[in-house]
Amino acid sequence: MELGKRCWPSSISQNSNWFKLEKRIFKSFDENFEKGWLALNIDPIGLSSAKVHMGAIIVPYGVLTFSCYEDGDAEQVKSLMGIYTSIVEKKIKNELENAAMLITRTADSKALKFPYFHTNLFDDGGMNVADLKNGLQTEDIFKGNENLEKYFASMTNGEANGSPLIDTEMATSIISRLAPEYTVVKPEKLEFENNEKDSDVNVEELTPITGKEVEYRTFLLDEDQVKYVNEMGTGHRVLLANAGAGKSVLLLARAYRYASAHKGERVLITCFNNNLAEAYRFKNRCANFGDNKNVYIMTFHKLVKKIYEECLHTKLLGQFPSDQEIKDLYLYIEQGRVNLQFAAIFIDEVQIFDPLFLDICYSLLGKNDDALFLMAGDLNQTVRNQSRRGDAPWKKMQKGRLNFNGRVKYMSKNYRNCPLISKFLKELLVTMNKKLAEANMINLKEFDYDVFGVGPSQNVTVNVQTRINRLSICEKVIGAINQLTKEYHVPYSEIAVLLPYQSVKQLNYFPQYWIKTELEKKGISYSIISGNSEDQRTRYGDTSGIVLSSIDSAIGLDFKAVILAGLYPYGYYFSENKHRFVKCGNWRQVSKLDEEDKEKIKIQIRKIYTACSRAREALYVLSDMEQGTALDSILEGVK
């Protein structure tokens, strides 16, 4: 697709902290360019600072990065510009050459498909060393496509013929390397043929193939998301949205922006499950942001373990911290025995967190004016039993009694689910929340639970089957896989089978084992991403074949196609008093249960919604719950 015109940010206010030079560049680009992408105040290699901002302009015939200096005389720093420019160009060129889409190959070497250079811009209109050789004023570069085209031609000793070398897909890949905070990267590798480089290219200019040349499917944030990332202030904030609204994307993007602006300060990104943490680490690696040693990405329980081992110099009694060890940690922090603080803390899927967990995180937040405490979540995706009344854990925090008036943002736009799935999820939300409210299990006035937008993905199918014989569930799953691959041409690697439980011995129910065994018989590859043992589960980003996962472990992830199965145990709930699974009755019977049992049934209902919302284009709900139970009636009502 031909490259259009786009700018990050989309607007610059006069009273903002942008350099005067950046404002002039933005204005000139807006007025004079017809094609090209401009990104200002980015930090692709960690060399930006309060006095030097970096930016990039991508046009159909090349890429130019630049360093903006608010103050300074070109003559005073000219002697250092050559060395600085060479370092920047080498680092950025190496990063761009790791994108398979952007290179051509010859034998064991590679080269970019387009010219790339770096220049330095001063407020007084000075010139950098490379430009001095060509007699070009750098301020002229931003006076239109024709001027920049001539610049590239002069730098490559070529002709300014305007031959397009970069399209929209390539430009997206470039932005993902230079400004990762504005992109979403999926763990889906794109394959490219080994294009041979023209024979007249100077071999000395080529660099060796390293094996790191990969390309992942990448999407750009839209203007609303970019605006939120750049305009969100400091302090404590809550971002609420239903599934597919991109809250995790915004949280990571905001963490990038904060870490770039506060070099040397510790930044924490934490969540509840391992797969979501690994998804963050995967995106972190793809974004070339992994070199920032001050950005910590870990689950809350691994954070607790880290504090015990590195700050308190003791080990946990088990693999994971116990409830008592977590309570003790809060006291240790209050007593000043923990010398770990973060300038910013980002918490994802906050609805799963116990208020005590939030108190511990907030206690680790620094006291500086720029401190940021951001929580993001979806109140419809509570997948843990909670020992509290109400769905907002931050309202139950003891630490600080935070005031969130005006600091809670709701997002309804959907970036994930196709229209068919979006319609189904909307109906599912309305039905389940109406039933929960009638049974006095939620208060619909507390939040707007039923907001759900329509996503952009292509329609494929929604298939809901209820009251399947439990002994036939494996056969139904294999049938759904065959239909997805043969009729809808969905590859195995983009299909996930989500299960509430791997097995329930009391009910003589072992869905994961049954499905796994059948896949092996048919020679279909699969990866298991749930379970406590890291030796048995596959790390997110390293999966191959069909994904098998619990619903809990799929939080924060999405797949082209989802098969939700193994729902038979949801016709029951586990009674702590009776120490066994008890059959779940109809809604009239559920409304008479005690609060603890109601909470368990509410969590099961919301897990169904969570699992269904993981699907982008195809969704199969294969329910073997028995007729007459509360959850069965919901699926019957929306299928």
Image: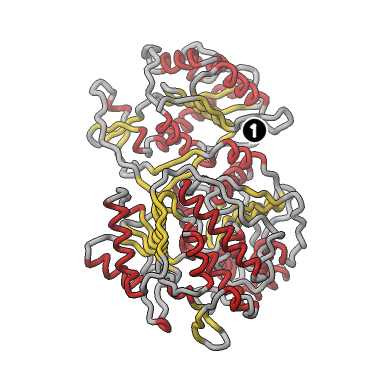
Q: Quadrant of the N terminus?
A: top left
Check disc 1 and give the amino acid type: Lys
Percent coordinates x, y for residue 621 in the rendering: 42, 61
**Pick the front one: 293 or 582:** 582
Percent coordinates x, y for residue 557 in the rendering: 47, 55
Q: Residue at x 58, y 87 (%)?
A: 577
Is residue 338 among the parts visible in the rendering? no
Percent coordinates x, y for residue 98 in the rendering: 37, 39
Where residue 160 sits, quadrant-wise, is top left
How many numbered discs, if any? Answer: 1
Residue 111 to residue 293: above or below: above
Residue 380 to residue 422: above or below: below
Percent coordinates x, y for residue 309 in the rendering: 56, 70
Name the side, left or right, on which 507 lies relative to 293.
Answer: left
Where residue 622 sits, quadrant-wise, is bottom left
Q: Residue at x 57, y 50 (%)?
A: 452
Q: Which residue is mark 1?
A: 51
Residue 237 to residue 325: above or below: above
**Pick the front one: 637 or 257:** 637
Is residue 598 among the parts visible in the rendering? yes
**Pick the front one: 538 or 625:** 625
Tag 1's secondary structure? loop
Name the side, left or right, on which 12 lies relative to 107.
Answer: right
Where residue 606 sits, quadrant-wise, is bottom right
